[in-house]
């Protein structure tokens, strides 16, 4: 590969990996399996080794992903939280042992532990009491989730033993047992909430909930695997883990002391099959040098310790028969082939269906009807077919024909050049597309209409009570009460929730009406440029693309949405019912306590959110600015204000005002 090609490939890989990091750590909804992710990371690592001049410090091969969110306060880890080197091959594990034995000149004792698949946590204890629990964050700083962790019953709040160091850190993995996960998803599906893809995402998502009572109800567990302190009780990892267990931490019995690498391999064999019977998911085995002095000698790379490695199991697979293919039409009109399988048990649940993505995927697999296929659970909810057992193909095998018209409305399908998916172009009348738009309209970030989930939309649709989202505003309690599983209370809740949605601000209404490619942020931008929908309806491509952040794709989507008279009729109806189609006139300030003052908000606050403080500044006639300059009057400074900002403020002689002082100044206490 030429250097220019490598540069381009590295750029693409980085972009892709960052996107997957965001999906995994922040959104808790990965779109690929760990194995596929590791393949990307390995490819990047190999290219960086081959072209060292293209390797940068900010490469994902040198940094751990970050789970940091805005909602929690962050603190620095006393000991950084690194990741582990990993391998899927026993040969590489042998090489890991070889490197270490070369350094010591004799067989090395290892500790083998299961690699629990959850969300990592680092908990500091002071004088025997839980002091602070931090997520991994970016490895250097993590989110403070102490109040959530305190609700997990298997984690001690107070330790009574006499032999504890005055301060120590324990690390472990927060897990959701599979049984609890299945129940949680059942409940979520009944109430129309989005499902968690797997127990790991459910655990990580739960840990970041803002209501500790909800966390307490989710049945999380924690398995511990690391003890850190100035004065550890013992000189080996194994003994320290036994001590942690004595103090009340859950250190699983599976932990094993191995005298050499052969015993490590045996441990790996045992759990390859044994893991199926565990109540929670593991994705491999962690092998650690037992002796702490040797650990110290071996040290760390930028990202991980040299004294430990994780051996990852490939995702579990099952072999079953492909019975037939059905075709699903999604909310956007995309058609997805779905494989219907002979039911088979896989990684904790029975699998009956698997996604096939598109026509190309079927061709790539060389898949025929009646084939025996390998299924695997990746990062997503629906398992996928990863291979075909060509040897067991019989005379019943038949080629798969991709459909040519929409299974829902009969319209001939289209496949645009360069795209992998077939689409149903009947945007206006195809039922799943209509239902999808209604589901989007009522979703939390759009009109936030509670009490109606996917199932209710289906029901209302099948009873001909709604055909589009404007119809929601004509529903009456009398129409709803007789429906299955409804009752008077639910019916009246739904009606009042629909009524409450009339106060949803204009920018969210613009998001809710479902113009293709117009997400929440674009909707906000449009709302601030066009203070009323009338201007937006009249706007042409040129006017729209002149706006920052709006490219030709979004612009043409907006224009064609409003060119459709059916959409205009719906908007007129919504306007008649009272939805907000213009930006509310901003109220003038109520006092002039902050008149003429330019205020920068920085840091984290206890009493109010940043947005609240912005509103308070406006309310009292002040101006909020984003960055510090000579014209800044003062800085409203919360905790954790960055050092660069502090220095700039000091250099310019700009005073810092605390949250308390600010509330006094504005009379908002
Ligand atoms: S030891 C410095 N042991 O795997 C070594 N980690 O990829 C610290 N994990 O962030 C890690 N089970 O969340 C260790 N038995 C185990 C583990 C384990 C799961 C997770 C942990 C860590 C990640 C590293």
Image (cartoon, helix red, strand yellow):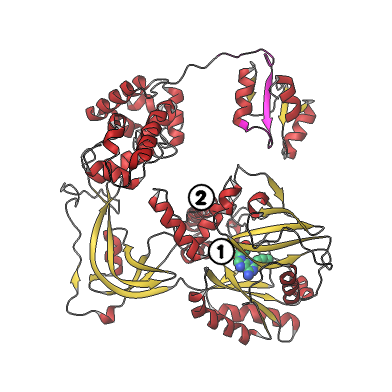
> Observer-nearest residue: 635 or 170?
170
**Residue at the disc numbered 2:** 27
Query: Quick check: is the Cβ at mark 1 less than 8 Å away from ligand 1?
Result: no
Looking at the image, in which quadrant does ligand 1 appear? bottom right
Q: Position of residue 567 (x, y in %)?
A: 26, 29
Per the image, label 2 sits on a secondary structure element best described as loop
Residue 601 in sight from this viewpoint: yes
Q: Position of residue 147 (x, y in %)?
A: 66, 49
- Residue found 64% across the figure and 56% down from its top: 136
**Magenta segment, which residues?**
588-610
**Residue at the disc numbered 1:** 45
Which of the 4 quarters of the picture holds residue 95? Answer: bottom right
Which of the 4 quarters of the picture holds residue 468? Answer: top left
> Observer-nearest residue: 54 or 636?
636
Crowding at mark 1 (Cα within 10 Å: few <14, some 14-19, many 20+): some
Seen in the picture, residue 301 relative to 448 is either above or below; the reply is: below
Q: Main secondary structure of the magenta part?
A: loop
Look at the image and tell me in which quarter the C terminus lies: top right
Q: In this view, does 85 lie to the left or right of 371?
A: right
Q: Position of residue 1 (x, y in %)?
A: 47, 63
Q: Is residue 273 left or right of residue 342?
A: right
Is residue 609 on the magenta stretch?
A: yes
Crowding at mark 2 (Cα within 10 Å: few <14, some 14-19, many 20+): some
- Residue found 23% across the figure and 29% down from its top: 566
Query: Do the numbered discs 2 and 1 sit on residues whose CB atoms are within 8 Å?
Result: no
> Observer-nearest residue: 537 or 51?
537
Of pointers 2 and 1, the one earlier in the residue sequence: 2
**Mark 2 and mark 1: Cα distance apart in space:** 25 Å
Foreground label between 2 and 1: 2
Seen in the picture, residue 562 relative to 371 is either above or below; the reply is: above
Looking at the image, the residue that sits furthest to the front is 488
Per the image, label 1 sits on a secondary structure element best described as helix
């Amino acid at each position: 590969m030429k250097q220019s090609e490598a540069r381009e490939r590295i750029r693409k890989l980085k972009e892709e990996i960052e996107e997957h990091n965001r999906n995994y750590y922040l959104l808790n909804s990965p779109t690929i399996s760990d194995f596929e992710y590791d393949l990307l990371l390995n490819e990047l690592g190999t290219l960086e080794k081959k072209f060292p001049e293209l390797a940068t410090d900010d490469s994902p091969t040198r940094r751990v992903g970050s789970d940091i969110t805005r909602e929690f306060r962050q603190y620095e880890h006393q000991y950084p939280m690194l990741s582990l080197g990993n391998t899927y091959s026993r040969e590489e594990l042998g090489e890991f042992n070889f490197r270490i034995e070369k350094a010591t000149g004799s067989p090395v004792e290892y500790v083998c532990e299961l690699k629990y698949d959850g969300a990592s946590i680092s908990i500091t204890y002071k004088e025997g009491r839980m002091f602070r629990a931090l997520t991994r964050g970016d490895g250097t700083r993590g989110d403070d989730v102490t109040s959530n962790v305190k609700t997990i019953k298997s984690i001690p709040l107070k330790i009574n033993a006499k032999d504890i160091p005055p301060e120590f850190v324990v690390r472990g993995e927060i897990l959701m047992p599979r049984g609890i996960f299945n129940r949680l998803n059942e409940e979520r599906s009944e109430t129309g909430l989005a499902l968690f893809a797997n127990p790991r995402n459910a655990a990580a998502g739960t840990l970041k909930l803002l209501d500790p009572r909800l966390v307490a109800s989710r049945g999380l567990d924690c398995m511990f695997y690391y003890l850190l302190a100035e004065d550890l009780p013992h000189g080996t990892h194994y003994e320290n883990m036994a001590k942690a267990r004595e103090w009340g931490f859950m250190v699983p019995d599976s932990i094993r002391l191995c005298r050499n690498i052969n015993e490590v391999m045996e441990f790996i064999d045992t759990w390859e099959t044994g893991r199926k019977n565990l109540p929670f998911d593991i994705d491999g085995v962690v092998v650690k040098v037992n002796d702490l002095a040797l650990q110290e000698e071996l040290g760390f790379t930028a990202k991980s310790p040299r004294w430990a490695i994780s051996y990852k199991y490939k995702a579990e697979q099952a072999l079953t028969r492909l019975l037939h293919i059905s075709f699903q039409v999604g909310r956007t009109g995309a058609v997805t082939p779905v494989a219907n399988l002979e039911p088979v048990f896989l990684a904790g649940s029975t699998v009956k269906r698997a996604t096939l993505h598109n026509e190309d995927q079927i061709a790539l697999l060389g898949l025929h009807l009646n084939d025996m296929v390998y299924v695997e659970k990746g990062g997503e909810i629906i398992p996928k077919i990863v291979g075909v057992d060509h040897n067991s193909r019989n005379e019943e095998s038949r080629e798969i024909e991709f459909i040519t018209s929409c299974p829902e409305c009969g319209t001939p399908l289209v496949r645009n050049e360069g795209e992998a998916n077939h689409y149903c172009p009947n945007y206006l009348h195809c039922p799943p597309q209509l239902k999808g738009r209604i589901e989007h309209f009522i979703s939390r970030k759009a009109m936030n209409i509670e009490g109606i989930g996917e199932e209710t939309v289906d029901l209302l649709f099948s009873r001909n009570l709604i055909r589009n989202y404007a119809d929601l505003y004509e529903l009456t309690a009398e129409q709803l009460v007789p429906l299955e599983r409804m009752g008077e209370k639910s019916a009246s809740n739904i009606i009042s929730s629909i009524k409450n949605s009339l106060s949803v601000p204009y920018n969210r209404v613009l998001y809710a009406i479902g113009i293709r490619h117009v997400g929440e942020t674009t909707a906000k931008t449009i709302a601030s440029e066009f203070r009323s929908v009338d201007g937006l309806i009249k706007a042409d491509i040129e006017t729209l693309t002149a706006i920052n952040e709006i490219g030709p794709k979004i612009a043409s989507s907006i224009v064609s949405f409003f060119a459709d008279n059916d959409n205009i009729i719906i908007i007129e109806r919504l306007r008649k019912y009272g939805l907000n189609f213009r930006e509310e006139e901003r109220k003038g300030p109520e006092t002039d306590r902050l008149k003429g003052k330019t205020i920068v908000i920085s840091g984290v606050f206890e009493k109010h959110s940043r947005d609240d403080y912005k509103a308070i500044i406006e309310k009292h006639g002040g101006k909020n600015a984003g960055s510090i300059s000579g014209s800044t009057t003062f800085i409203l400074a919360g905790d954790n204000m960055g050092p660069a900002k502090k220095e700039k403020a000091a250099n310019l002689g700009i005073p810092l005002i605390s949250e308390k002082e600010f509330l006094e100044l504005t009379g908002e206490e």
